[in-house]
Structures are given as C-alpha cells and as structure tokens.
Amino acid sequence: MTKVKTYNKVLKKLSVDCEKCCGLCCVALYFSKSDGFPTDKAAGKPCINLMSDFCCCIHSKLIECKMKGCLAYDCFGAGQMVTQSIYHGSDWKSKSEISGQMFKVFLIVWQLHQMLWYLVEASSLVFDSGIKNDIDALIIENENITKLSPDEILNFDIDKYKSKVNNILRIVSKLISNPNSTRSSDKKTVDFIGKNLKKQNLDGRDLSMTLLIAANLEGCSLNGTNLLGADLRDANIKNTDLSKSIFLTQGQINSAIGNKNTILPSYLSLPISWN
Ligand code: SF4
Ligand code: SF4
C-alpha cells in the first residue's frame, strides 16, 4: 500500500516496542476495571501487575484474565520514543524526580503519534498537491516536536496543532467519501451499538467517530469505509475484509472480535487473542 511505501520509516516508529519502554502506559494512564484493566487506578500510579523490570507479570494470561483494556491499548510507539529518544534511556522509577514530567510528555507524544498515524494515511489518500503539501508539512512539524526537550514539548501548543490536524482530516474525509453510497443521515446516526449490519454494503461510507460497539459487521463490504475514531469495541468483524477500510488503527482492531478469516490492511496485524 502507498501508505507503507511512502512513509515506511514513520510507520516503523509508530509500532509499539515495549522492550524499549519503561512500562509508561501501565503507570502514566488512569484506568478502570470496568474498561478491562486489572483494577481502578489513578494516573501516575503503577499497575499492580507491573514488575521491577517493567514487564507485566500476567502478560501471557491477559486473554485468560479478560484484560480487554490492556489487550486493546496501542501507544503508537510513544512509549519507546519517550523512554529512548526524549529521555535517553532514563526511566520514571530510578529517576523519580522526572516521573511526573515524563508521564505528561508521554501523554502528549501519544497524541502526536496518533495524529501522525492518521496524517500518513491521509497523505496516501489524496492527489490534490495543495492538500498533500499541507499534510506533509503537518507530518514534518509533528516529527520535529518529538525532537524537542521535555520542557519544550510540554510548552508546545498541542490544542492548536490538533485543530489543524482535525481540519485537514475533515477535508480528506469529505474528499474520499463516496457521495453515491454515503447516506445523508450518516453523520447524524452515530450510534450503531449492538446493531446487526451483517453483510451490508458499507463501501465508501463515512463512519468516522461512530459508535459500533458490539455491532455485527460480519461479512460487510467495507471498501473505502472511513472508520476514523469509530468505536469498534466487541464489534464482530469475523469473516470480514477490512483491507481497504480507511483510518483504521491497531487499537480498534485489538478491541474488536475477529477470526483468522478477517482480512486487515497490510500495516495492521491479527491480534493473538483471536486465535
Ligand atoms: S507505553 Fe507503549 S511501548 Fe510502553 S509498555 Fe505501553 S504499549 Fe508498550
Ligand atoms: S495488567 Fe499488565 S499490561 Fe495491563 S496495565 Fe497492568 S502491567 Fe500493564
């Protein structure tokens, strides 16, 4: 796919590499038991299962223990970027004086990397050179921010940047949606929770930010379907071809229910929990 060819290096950077991280998501984030995490936990407090070497003591049992939140989480490579590049291998435990700052930086880099993921895909979807240049400029800006010092990253106006990214993604979404197959009511109907959409033709539909929790999408046709930010938790995507769906992330896939017949875009992988 063009996405992979053009921005291969960037995509590599966005792949999670927990071995090069100091368990940042297991400490920095707030999480709750009801979302499939081990317990309710405040941001900045280590998970009860995080060991001194930053490995998870129940890693091999996450499926068995039904830790859906842990299984679905994807930091877009923010963990290793913060640990290795921004803090040069330091960690929040041995340098407790930097822990608070490190967690805040992680949260910003996580958002930046998520936006970078979408921008890379957006760049591969448009042909208008003006829009393409705008996207590429945002990608360069994004990469430059993560080369800054922790203090500079914290002072960066992330909301302003986010608004520019959202704006360009809106433009791209509009350009790529298929007017013949997009129902005018799509953007009003953002709730498909538990709906049975089995084998429906959803080609070219704009389902961005749609609630598809526990929806049945088995066998649906999803070519060019925009799934940006769609909530796919427990959605049935067994025997479904998503290889040409747009703006999909690994986190969305991890949170859905598929099988070995589910076909994903080449840059995403089948979760082990589906075996
Ligand atoms: S922050 Fe990312 S790299 Fe670090 S442990 Fe979590 S998922 Fe792995
Ligand atoms: S259970 Fe394991 S993966 Fe989940 S938050 Fe705790 S240490 Fe991290």
Image: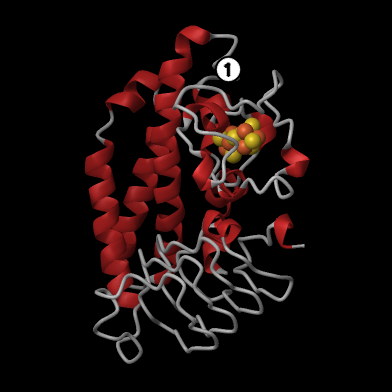
- The image quarter containing residue 159 is top left
> Compared with residue 76, is residue 267 higher up or lower down, i.e. above or below?
below
At 49% from the left edge and 88% from the top edge, which residue is drawn? 200
Residue 122, percent from left and from top = 40, 63
At 70% from the left edge and 29% from the top edge, which residue is drawn? 55
The quarter of the rendered structure image containing the C terminus is bottom right
Q: Residue 253 vs residue 64: left or right? A: left
Instruction: Decide which of 176, 201 is in the foreground and name it.
Output: 201
Residue 216, percent from left and from top = 53, 77
Image-quarter location of ligand 2: top right
Instruction: Decide which of 233, 88 is in the foreground and name it.
Output: 233
- The image quarter containing residue 145 is top left
Crowdedness near tag 1: few (<14), some (14–19) or many (≥20) residues, C-alpha within 10 Å: many
Q: Secondary structure at mark 1?
A: loop
- The image quarter containing residue 220 is bottom right
Residue 239, percent from left and from top = 66, 79
Q: Residue 4 vs residue 116: left or right? A: right
Q: Which residue is mark 1?
A: 91
Instruction: Decide which of 240, 217 is in the foreground and name it.
Output: 217
The quarter of the rendered structure image containing the N terminus is bottom right
> Compared with residue 164, is residue 27 higher up or lower down, i.e. above or below?
above
Residue 187, percent from left and from top = 27, 74
Question: What scheme was used to colour the molecule?
Answer: secondary structure
> Compared with residue 50, is residue 72 higher up or lower down, i.e. above or below?
below
Instruction: Let me know if residue 228 appears in the view.
Output: yes
Instruction: Let me know if residue 130 appears in the view.
Output: no
Q: Say which amino acid is labelled 1.
A: Asp
At 33% from the left edge and 57% from the top edge, which residue is drawn? 135
